[in-house]
Image (spheres, rainbow, N blue to C red):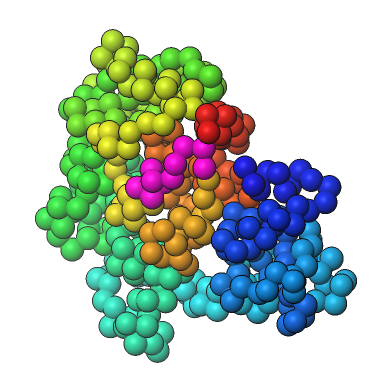
Amino acid sequence: MLEIQIHNQSTLDEEQCWNALTTRSAQMDGAFVFAVRSTGIYCRPSCPARRPQRENVRFFRLPAEAVAAGFRPCLRCHPDQQQVPSPHTELVKQIRQYIEDHLETPLRLANLSTQFHMSPYHLQRTFKQVTGLSPRQYTESLRLKQFKTRLQEGEPVTSALYNAGYQSSSSVYERTPMQLGMTPATYQRGGKGVRLAYTISESTLGNVLIATTERGLAAIRFGESRQDLEAELAREYPQAEHTYDTERLRPWLEHLQRALAGQAIETDIPLDVQATAFQWKVWRALQAIPAGQTRSYSEVAQAIGQPSAVRAVAQACAANHVAVFIPCHRVVRNNGQLGGYRWGIERKQRLLALEQSKL
């Protein structure tokens, strides 16, 4: 991989750096910066500015080296900062807090625009650029989270839905099956009536649990022990009908073993995974990343048409319940570092190494 080669060299390979520059590789941000003699400015490899002439370019491993050589940072790509600042971040933080404080009342975009002295169009556009969600989608995600918490605490469905800010029971029952995988009453009963078949097997990455419903694959989770994996499944669905059935899940196990051997797998497998529309959009983008390759969170955000939703993309990756088949391990930080992984950074590193060995 290009970024690995550059990180491991004592001196930069200028040909590789130039290739990264010409392709505006966001994966190489943090590996080096380039400076342009004719402008006196240095940039990230992914900078959207017009490409300079090769003879005018110098490469530096660190921004400080470019500064010492007399260059100043670009005001478009901010190579001297770890993350590009958003002028709207503080404003959106205030809007989010306002929404959280008024969940019990219906959300109206007109009311938000009046509160923050912005046009409805500009407010919605700004909010979505920063969070990846519209104000309504953000509100619904908060209400659903509060609703689930109240149900788990034993509050009756009717009072739980109204206390979470829903205006009618029909609105809950129309929306939550896709997000809970069941009706609110069933979820409150810990999944009572849901049939979950599962098995636990040893793999090259440790113990792995696979669970399915009648509709498709529901979970692939790695864990340190069989007991931990079973306890986690029981906490999520304590009243579901759990059946340990290795024979029934053998095709899934074989499919997973092929994936763990670094082989490409199909992306149209049936999934019974509950998520928001935004999370599904991110997960579909992850499934489009070829085995053995990686994308940065920024590149995934760009791929789904929401370039400012980098943080929301990271949160969607962290919410993934289906390891490997939804390949969140293929997403790395903008500087090429691996970043986090729900099932441990060592597993992420090994997964990528297995896939890259098959290229």
Residue 345 is drawn in which quadrant?
A: top right
Residue 273 percent across, percent down from the top left: 29, 39
Q: Is residue 356 above or below residue 106?
A: above
Residue furthest toward the left? 170
- Relative to the observer, which residue lies in front, 150 or 314? 314
- Relative to the observer, which residue lies in front, 41 or 340? 41
Q: Is residue 63 above or below residue 275?
A: below
- Relative to the observer, which residue lies in front, 161 or 347? 347
* Magenta-drawn stretch contains 287: yes
Residue 93 percent across, percent down from the top left: 49, 71
Residue 109 percent across, percent down from the top left: 29, 78
Q: Is residue 214 visible?
A: yes
Residue furthest toward the right? 68
Residue 75 is drawn in which quadrant?
A: bottom right
Q: Which residues are magenta?
A: 283-293
The quarter of the image holding the N terminus is top right
Q: Is residue 187 left or right of residue 21?
A: left
* Magenta-drawn stretch contains 210: no
Q: Residue at x 88, y 71 (%)?
A: 68
Q: Is residue 14 left or right of residue 317?
A: right
Residue furthest toward the top? 247
- Relative to the observer, which residue lies in front, 54 or 355? 54
Q: Is residue 139 visible?
A: no
Q: Residue at x 52, y 29 (%)?
A: 358
Number of labels in the image equals 0
Q: Is residue 89 above or below residue 156?
A: below
Q: Is residue 46 above or below residue 357?
A: below
Q: Residue at x 38, y 34 (%)?
A: 325
